[in-house]
Image (cartoon, coloured by chain):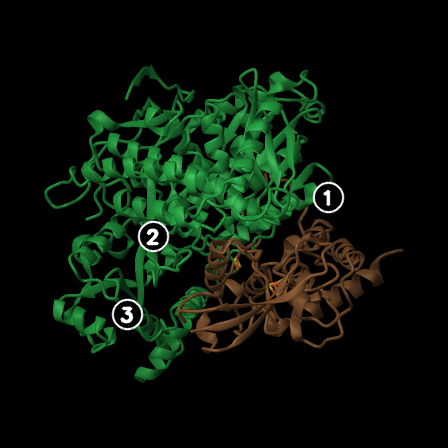
Amino acid sequence: MNLTLKIWRQKSPKDQGKMVDYPVSDISEHMSFLEMMDVLNETLIAKGEEPVAFDHDCREGICGMCSMYINGEAHGPDRGVTTCQLHMRKFKDGDTIYIEPFRAKAFPVIKDLSVDRSSFDRIQQAGGYISVNTSGNTQDANAIPIPKDDADLAMDAATCIGCGACVATCKNSSAMLFVGAKVSQYALLPQGQVEASQRVQNMVKQMDDEGFGNCTNTGACEVECPKGISLTNIARLNREFLSAKASSKN
Amino acid sequence: MSTDSKILDAKAPDGPIDERWTRHKDRINLVNPANKRLIDVIVVGTGLAGGSASATLAELGYNVKAFAYQDSPRRAHSIAAQGGINAAKNYQGDGDSAYRLFYDTVKGGDYRSRESNVYRLAEVSTNIIDQCVAQGVPFARDYGGLLDNRSFGGVLVSRTFYAKGQTGQQLLLGAYSAMNRQIARGKIEMFNRHEMLDVVVVDGKARGIIARNLVTGEIERHSAHAVVIASGGYGNVYFLSTNAMGSNTTAAWKIHKKGAYFANPCFTQIHPTCIPRSGDYQSKLTLMSESLRNDGRIWVPKNMDDVVAIREGRKKPTDLSEAERDYYLERRYPAFGNLVPRDVASRAAKERCDAGYGVNKTGEAVYLDFKSAIQRYGKEQAKIKGIDNPSESQILELGEGIVEAKYGNLFQMYEKIVDENPYKTPMMIYPATHYTMGGIWVDYNLMTTIEGCFAIGEANFSDHGANRLGASALMQGLADGYFVLPYTIGDYLSNDIRTGSISTDSPEFAEAEKSVKDRIDFFVNNKGEHSVDYYHKKLGKIMWDKCGMARNEKDLKEAISEISELRADFWKNVVVPGSADEMNAELEKAGRVADFLELGELFAKDALEREESCGGHFREEHVTEDGEAKRDDENFAYVAAWEYKGEPSDAQLHKEQLEFNDIKLKQRSYK
Ligand code: SF4
Ligand code: FES
């Protein structure tokens, strides 16, 4: 198929940036979206132009590195997938496709479609861990049985890949789904209880400091999340936060 | 080619095998906590090995500087490991033990690994599970709340722990969380979007690295008392592999060029269950976890007529009766059936496809079928639920439910890529490059032949011999990082407590920096005509065709000369757009492909030199009468460790003779 791509080009963080048109032809429906971008870049290189910068690595939907806002949706029109898992069969011959970076105050553009998501790392550093040394002198793994349902729910929350689609999609650029997923994983497990109250307060504070917006329950994040992280995680985050506030002395 | 008469010393301790690690730990030198604060360690790579090592070294008190080319340590490619992690916990009571895990690993590796290292790996495997549970890794559990296990290829016990089909992700996020705790305390300084481009050796010791900031293009000097390479494997030498797009050999290759021997480069794992290639534009291949072979049955049609009919779309695989299918693994290997090791399963698929029985248009695909499993689970569930005389559709529904619970995310992934429903029609699979057992040579302390330079995880060669068993890569990465290196590095660093901080203002740093800058300048200024990918794809094709699942002398010799010609052309005609002082993906790729073009030739040379078939290395000249791999223990029971001498063709071979005292060398049989 033949397509017209309208792509955000921005040389550097300080550059203004603008949309630029690129026609591409002979695109197979079996290609992934990023393979289509590879084809475009190879043609640009052959013409002596600069290829489009975009983040990607695993190309199988697990590393969370790929981003892209495609036709107004984070990770494009398909559900439950990342951009690298999106296939061209979701588009038709003659389509015009708008490709932009994930936009949020806390995700500044580095170049073209590549953005800086280190704010997510800093939220995790504020409390996204259990304080246990990796000495190997822990108790036997089966010493504390964990109800299967709790373990499964914790696993569901833990599948978040930290891509930031939830933020890019939210009209307030809120990171509540991302933070809710991590807080939930530990809140559901006995190992996470000891530090639960500190953890949620620290992570929420860091989230606010990074400039992510408030959650107004529009639920758009859940729809675009490639890993199906559910809104119940935001509810659990709110509960954890309120009870931590209520019980904390200051 | 010249061979060194000196035999490499692995410094493995002696004594009874099950006491060696404990005794070694008791004897090695320690660094006291106050002195650890005075010592800096660089770790390159933040996957399971690098992430766990960084966290543990920082907990111990060392100052760690960790480097990742990705934008966050959480994105290292360990994240993509699906199936599971082995540990000799014997929770299932099926007779597992450290010895059995050790035995399976040595046998699975076709007797080309070092006994002492493998035993240690098996021994610490149980700690890993305890550790990860304490960190909050949500492993799968049974209804009693205890940890669940499954089986993987090449073994007869159930010792694999898993977190759905995302075990690597969960383990890596565990290591990432431990790193985050140390980053917050200031004990790890994290350098994201940084790539190591050289190691700096001062007075024979590794004392730092040169790294490029991939956002600004700045070339930076970083010093330390020791350098740990945890940069993964070199599977992308094949261009198409299950590795991430950015996975590369650059860090490993740079230390090789500065004196670290590269061991067994030809030992590569071609994984049997990957989604087949669909076209020339393909950028990578996707693995379907080996865990699928617990329940899936692999087959091709028995009759050529059916193969043709299927390719032409006149028949569907589901039209074929049981009698018309050839479950070739069950036929050839009745004892292990679909759970034979990876190398065996891959070659068997190639054998059928080479004979013309491949089931897709390219002729390179076999079926992986869940029909029997769905039926079996469906009937079992109907019994459990007390449904008498369940209808066919009830059985299917119940059975599909169980299969979905076990493999749901893998099935979904398949459907997204191939656009077919694997619950209703068998999956198509074909082998693809997945893992590299070869890597930087290390001694028992995981130190390379450069003093103070260590290699851990997939980047080293140590534990998997000529073939890695499923669910052992995660085990090795975490064992090295959490439990082995943190002890052994102390032995080396105990001599460094009075050294003081290492200056980056030395001729050695200046020289390394200059060579890095010169190479970058060459790339951005060269007026060539072919893109980096053009060369990478060509290299990949040579590697796959001539150094792939089956190798022979003629092909390997051709590969060597073709790669060397391609490399010469690359240095004349490659084009890299953009400049050096900005984010520039093509420039990054150029440096990586330049290194692959050297490694590929050494790979072929190593494969040519190893005149035997073992594990993933299959020489067509060396087969038994029934077509199985024929090892030559008399002449090749050694590790081939190559020393850099300029061109790959000049590399010098050093041998580490392998001794087997606790396991008897046998022909590996899975029949
Ligand atoms: S919650 Fe979903 S959308 Fe948000 S970062 Fe995690 S995986 Fe991405
Ligand atoms: S590239 Fe890894 S999730 Fe898309």
The image's mark for residue B184 is: 1
Read off the chain for label 1.
Answer: B
Q: Earlier in the sequence, mark 1 or mark 2?
A: 1
Secondary element under disc 3, as helix, strand or loop, is helix
Q: Residue at x 38, y 39 (%)?
A: B569
* Residue B394 percent location from the top left of the image: 36, 82
Read off the chain for label 3.
Answer: B
User: Mark 3 touching mark 2, by CB under 8 A?
Assistant: no
Give chain B's shade: green
Q: Residue furthest left?
A: B625
| Identity, as a three-letter code, of the amino acid under mark 1 | Ala
| Identity, as a three-letter code, of the amino acid under mark 2 | Ala
Q: Residues within 10 Å of mark 3 (few under 14, many from 20)?
A: few
Task: Evaluate whether residue B95 shows in this view.
Answer: no
Task: Evaluate whether residue B385 shows in this view.
Answer: yes
| Identity, as a three-letter code, of the amino acid under mark 3 | Ser
The residue beneath circle 3 is: B372
Give chain A's shade: brown
